[in-house]
Image: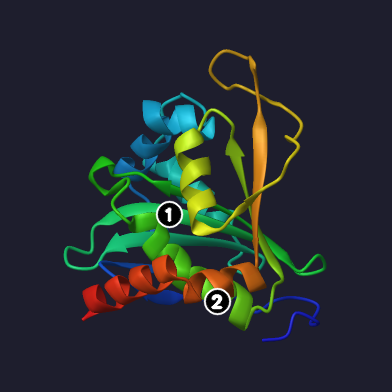
Amino acid sequence: MSLNAKRLPKQQLWFPAGPYFLRTVKREDASQRWADWLSDPWTVHVLNTSPRAMTKLDIADYIKSFDQRERLLLGIFEKGSRSHVGFIRLDINAAASEGLVSAVIGEKDHRNAGATVNTFIPLLRFVFDDLKLGRIRAFVLERNQTTIQYLSKLGWMLDPEPEKPVQSHTDGSLLVLRRMSWDRPGFQAWLKSPIGQRIVKRMEAAQG
């Protein structure tokens, strides 16, 4: 796929991801459970989302805001039960040859259980191999050290200087924001590393 075209084609994506699969979100995926994820205290803390209660209609409007071209919204689903457990947002900047990614694992039982790393592998293969982007970025609040340390272990690079502070949606205080990135060579090197090979083999075995 060439990024020289004026506009990227609309994407309908589906990726196996070990015990999960990742696919383009549909309007019928909107649910009150998804709405509740975004006002959950854990999500509010780590992502600085608004603590206000949201509705299924809010989620339906959110889904409609994605063109599935430069702005992609993908759902994370458990393979066996087909239960919706989270979602990934990917914003593509073709001119800069980079993407901005953010992920939410909404279901508590699936946090720290491999949902993020399993789904990121096929997603980043798509980003680097199909879209031919040079870099992927993610913004993480500095107080979310669990995610920063987790991504660092996977090979993501933490920018030395923090970003401009963002205002808390909870109390109005200023929160330190950090930027992390992974380029194509870094991702390819990680796939060939012992930990990368171990995770990929485990993911492929779970896919059956």
The percent position of residue 46, horizontal first and vertical second, equals 48, 32
Quadrant that contains the C terminus: bottom left
- Where residue 66 appears, x then y in whole percent? 58, 58
Tell me if I can see residue 24 in this picture: no
Along the line of sight, which residue is nearer the eye, 153 or 151? 153
Tell me the SS state at disc 2: helix
Residue sitting at x 63%, y 14%: 173
The residue at the far front in this view is 194
* Mark closest to the chain's N terminus, 2 or 1: 1
Q: Tell which residue pokes out farthest to the bottom in this image.
A: 1
Local crowd at mark 2 within 10 Å, few (<14), some, or many (≥20)? some
Q: Position of residue 129 (x, y in %)?
A: 60, 81
The quadrant of the picture occupied by the N terminus is: bottom right
- Give me the residue at 58% from left, 55% from top: 156
How many marks on residues? 2
Q: Amino acid at mark 1?
A: Phe
* SS at badge 1: strand
The label on residue 87 is: 1
Can you see residue 189? yes
Circle 2 residue: 126
Instruction: Name the disc covering residue 26, or none.
Output: none
Vertically, is 143 above or below 64? above
Which quadrant would residue 108 be assigned to in this image? top left
Residue 184: image quadrant is bottom right
